Image (tube, rainbow, N blue to C red):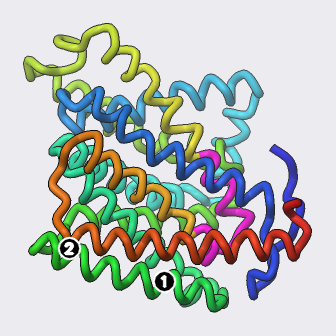
Amino acid sequence: MTSPQVVHTDDNSTIDRSGAVVGISAYLIWGLLTLFWKLLGDFAPLEMIGFRITMSLAMLSAYLLWRRRLVSLVRRVSNEKLWGRIAIASVVLTVNWTSYVVVVAQDHVVEAALGYFIAPLATMTIGVRVLGERMRTAQIVTASLGLASVLVLTVGYGRVPVYALLIAGSWSTYGYLKRTVPLSPIDSLAAETMILVIPALALVVWHLQYSNNVFASADGVEWTAVLLLGVITVVPLTMFAYAAQRIPMTVIGPMQYSVPVINFLLGWLAFGEDVSGTKFAGFSLVWLALVVLTVDTVRRARASGTVG
């Protein structure tokens, strides 16, 4: 990856091109990962989380050993007393992963979409209230449309969408925490999985008592998917961490809308989930927000000379 080409200002008048491209790409990958998790829908969500953490640490450790950085990473985290912040980030990330896998396994992909619709609002709120970022007119319009869509969709569900709120709250908090840890994306994620690996292995062992565990019932395709859990976890998370360190929260927040749009379309068109008129109206508001955001982002990028 190249170094940042534009340093953003407090009023977000410019956009780091590399950060924006990498951030958008990460969210597109996350949106399509619903198809991947459907392949593993026959297994317990917590068992999948255990494998996901274990495979991720295996992949990251191999990379860091190859680059001769593993020992220095542990030493740096210890010397700079970063384990506490990393532990909090790892717990928040686990909540997000578990909530998402549960709703996909229960065929509630549209509720996962709602969670990722709410997340940008929380992310932009953190940017404004905690980091002191200022919102432009287009971002205010985007946030207002997003809030309206959340209210409409919540009414459409007829209940408090607990998993959607967990997904939204955990993800926006994780995005903020990533900015407070002075480590590279790969080092930060490796440290998080180090903290989680013992509980993760315990989850895998615990599920051995059930007849439908991975070791007892997975076929060739499912085993391939399990072994790839590290790849599908590390790659987009590393891309996200790269972007989060280079563009404002009020910019990266609206990018998150691409994930729920993809999830909505998959839940509705691919998996046949019920989409009432109220739900469709709520999602339409978000699509309008995406149009506003896209036009504003392209205009600002061209004005700052970061795109042709």
Occupied quadrant, residue 40: top left
Q: Is residue 19 visible?
A: yes
Identified by mark 1, the residue type is Ala
Is the N terminus in the top left, top right, bottom left or bottom right quadrant? top right
Q: Position of residue 32 (x, y in %)?
A: 44, 41
Question: From the image, which quarter does the C terminus lie in?
Answer: bottom right
Q: Does residue 269 appear left or right of residue 44 in this picture?
A: right
Q: Residue at x 10, y 73 (%)?
A: 159
Amino acid under disc 2:
Thr
Asked whether 21 or 271 is in front, the reply is: 271
Looking at the image, residue 115 lies above or below residue 86: below
From where the camera sits, is residue 169 visible? no
Q: Which residues are magenta?
A: 238-252
Q: Main secondary structure of the magenta part?
A: helix
Point 45% across, 69% down: residue: 287
Residue 200 or residue 117, whichever sits in front: 117
